[in-house]
Amino acid sequence: MIATGGVMALTRRARGMGLAAMHAEIDFEALRDRNESIEGRINRSITTLLESQGVRLVRGSGSLLDAHTVRIDSADGTEEIHADAILLATGSRPRVPDWAEVDGDRVLTTRQAYPPKEMPSHLAVIGSGVTGVEFVHMFSSFGSKVSLVVSRQQVLPSKDPEVASELEQNFIERGVNLLKGARASAIDRTDDGVIVHCDDGRKVECSHALLAIGSVPNIEGLGLDAAGVELGANGYVVSTGHHCQSNVSHIYSAGDLSGKLPLSSVASMQGRKIAEHVMGLHAHDHRHLDYDKAASAIFTEPEIADVGLAEADAFADGRKIRVTKVPFSASAKALIEGDARGFVKILSDPATGVVLGGSIVGRNAAELISVIALAVTAGLKVADIAESLLVHPSLAEALADAAD
């Protein structure tokens, strides 16, 4: 849906690229069909891959009867499987506060907006974290009026302030209504929409409201008590050591349930590391999963991506770092493509030149961050990036310029 919205936004910038004004209208049913088609193709591909490797797929609801026995309830009946090792990867679901009543019609969770039943004329997004700002971007690209309830004084409160400022500016240019320092406290239904009330007295009258205020782990009915698996105060499985093990050594957790970074890439790597541990491969050459070196992206426009040490964290710890920043307005490729928003920022150790982290705001940031992520993971120096012979013209040249 973000990709479709991006194409619509691109048509609005057509005049700036020497084209006559263009106007694209959304075909809601075609969009829904496209989403379902892509999801179906991915699911079939993964299923085929698993079955080709001899994996037995059992469709049903699983629960632990004890530390080695999994009960499966399916349409074909009940089955019990004895297992030497068990991986729990049940994910999470959107958090719904007590003051909100989700109806899937006017008041939505993020899961009910891919896409919603109808396109909102005015959407109030509650929550300014990664998920919230992606939905703001998506629906504003589709032409919906959007209001964003921001409980702090900046969107993306956990991100670099320069990064957040760049995104806020884009939202303002799009006409997004930012309610900073406001915390939603109630949602009332009206005849033709909803009213979102904030704790400071402000309110938003809109057609739809979208809750994007975090998630909770799916632990209900898993039988964790029967298996002796401990949970932390936040409801996630307690992880011990470097191998994603629970307090029961042969029971592992991955993905959102593990309480680590809620990223698909992290979940996939956790699964890989768990498989290596179960098979004893960790006794050989093995690199532990380092969550501090995980790259992440936010699919707004412009895109946002970062990896490794954050500038604010380094200053808070009193750590000496070298920060270099290059705007895409100095990039030939960005100017050619008619989108010179954003910048590349690289953090390095001033004594050794080793790359410690970086942030990118701009076109294809999610792809470009891979270069910095590789440098952070492999302990490369800024000179290794600066002295690489990159393609010209390309957006990646900004990485070399920032490293120089």
Image (tube, rainbow, N blue to C red):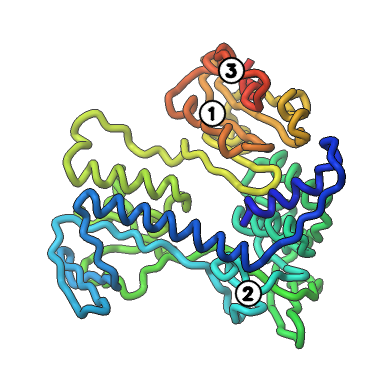
User: Could you tell whether 375 is left or right of 210 in the image?
Assistant: left
Q: Which residue is mark 3?
A: 390
Residue occupying the point 17% across, 64% down: 67
Q: Earlier in the sequence, mark 2 or mark 1?
A: 2
Residue type pointed to by label 3 = Leu
Residue type pointed to by label 2 = Lys
> Residue 307, how many percent across, how many down?
54, 36
Comparing 49 with 343, the one in front is 49
329 relative to 191, above or below: above
Element assignment for label 3: loop
**Inter-mark Cα distance, 2 to 1:** 40 Å
> Residue 258, how many percent across, how many down?
38, 55
Place residue 382 in its image quadrant. top right
Q: Earlier in the sequence, mark 3 or mark 1?
A: 1
Kindly check if marks 2 and 1 are in contact, taking CB atoms under 8 A apart as contact: no
Mark 1 Cα-neighbour bin, 10 Å: few <14, some 14–19, many ≥20:
many
Q: Quadrant of the N terminus?
A: bottom right
Element assignment for label 1: helix
Question: Is residue 157 at all visible to an observer of this figure?
Answer: yes
Q: Which residue is mark 1?
A: 372
Q: Which residue is mark 2?
A: 117
Please tell me whether mark 2 or mark 1 is closer to you in this view: 2
User: Could you tell whether 231 is left or right of 398 in the image?
Assistant: left
